[in-house]
Amino acid sequence: MEPVEDVRVRPDATIEELIEWYSRIHGFMAGHLVEAVKLLRRALRESNLRILTFTANLVSTGLRGVFAQLIREGLFNVVFTTAGTLDHDIARANGGRYLKGYFDADDKSLAREGYHRLGNIFIPVEDYGPKVEAFVRRLVEEARKEKERWGVYEILDLAGSMIEDENSILRAAHESGAKIFVPGWPDGAFGTAMFMESQAGRGVTLDYYIDMKLLSDIFFDRSGKATALIIGGGISKHHAIWWSQFREGLDYTVYVTTAVEYDGSLSGARPREAITWGKVKPEASKVVVYGDATIIVPILAAGILGTRS
């Protein structure tokens, strides 16, 4: 065992120096973050299947641009996320204002003044649902010109082609060829708007079985290695590890989470539990970093950018 070392910092430090300082500090999550960077640097070079999962709440923050950057630069080629990611990405790409607020705000006052609150992010009501609905109307118009039946990942790629915002996750996936899977796609403004267009007689049919066919093609191919960076929990985490069992488990995985294990939740379950389900290989390299993704992910991303170049 190596000794813990005291660190003296400099304001002009590089990301490599920062990671080296965390290595010397070691306790308590600093050492885990260093291990996560080292694991991903190796894993992304060795893996042909590179999975990124995250939850929609993070897309309301400036992390949206980081996710788009990681996808656009080809570090990850399969993305699992939740329905709200579509809402936030589309709203912001179409001029929606997401404002810096605070947790202790008076929610009754915010509601009267016409704001949604997402933690310490304030969203004017007119910059959320109406922005998504207007975009979906245009999306459906374009989709109907091509065909009536679409996979969800297919229509999300079409959506990405219609967005010009370089910080858009959908745009980045369209440009890089990454596939975005949203198994809970109806659970938000995007899904409801698609439904309403259909009810009005001008919609298209979304068929998630089409997505599942592509997922089976991807995950039943057991050649090469698979890496997953799983940020948060919920359906995006589960969908990734569920499909991974069909290729006999992940070879490398990093979890970034604030969820705890003792309540038996999927969100809090560690990679070691996934071994019992065949979702992570027994010999897999794995790290869990506990903490707020808005603090951890930028450091982690800076540490791995350029890994595949």
Image: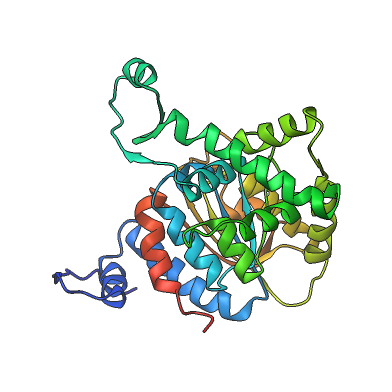
Q: Which quadrant of the structure image shows residue 178?
A: bottom right
Q: Nearer the viewer, residue 262 or 213?
A: 213
Most extreme residue toward the bottom, as rendered?
309
Residue 266 in view in this figure: no
Residue located at (85% from left, 56% from top) = 213
Q: Quadrant of the N terminus?
A: bottom left
Residue 28 in view in this figure: yes
Q: Position of residue 260 (x, y in %)?
A: 48, 40
Q: Position of residue 161 (x, y in %)?
A: 63, 60
Residue located at (48% from left, 62% from top) = 166
Q: How is the image coloured?
A: rainbow
Q: How many marks?
A: 0
Q: Position of residue 134 (x, y in %)?
A: 60, 38
Q: Position of residue 79 (x, y in %)?
A: 63, 58
Please, is residue 308 above or below residue 66 in the view? Answer: below
Q: Nearer the viewer, residue 15 or 206?
A: 206
Would residue 268 be found to the left or right of residue 302 on screen? right
Q: Nearer the viewer, residue 134 or 74?
A: 134
Residue located at (66% from left, 52% from top) = 274
Would residue 231 be found to the left or right of residue 198 on screen? left
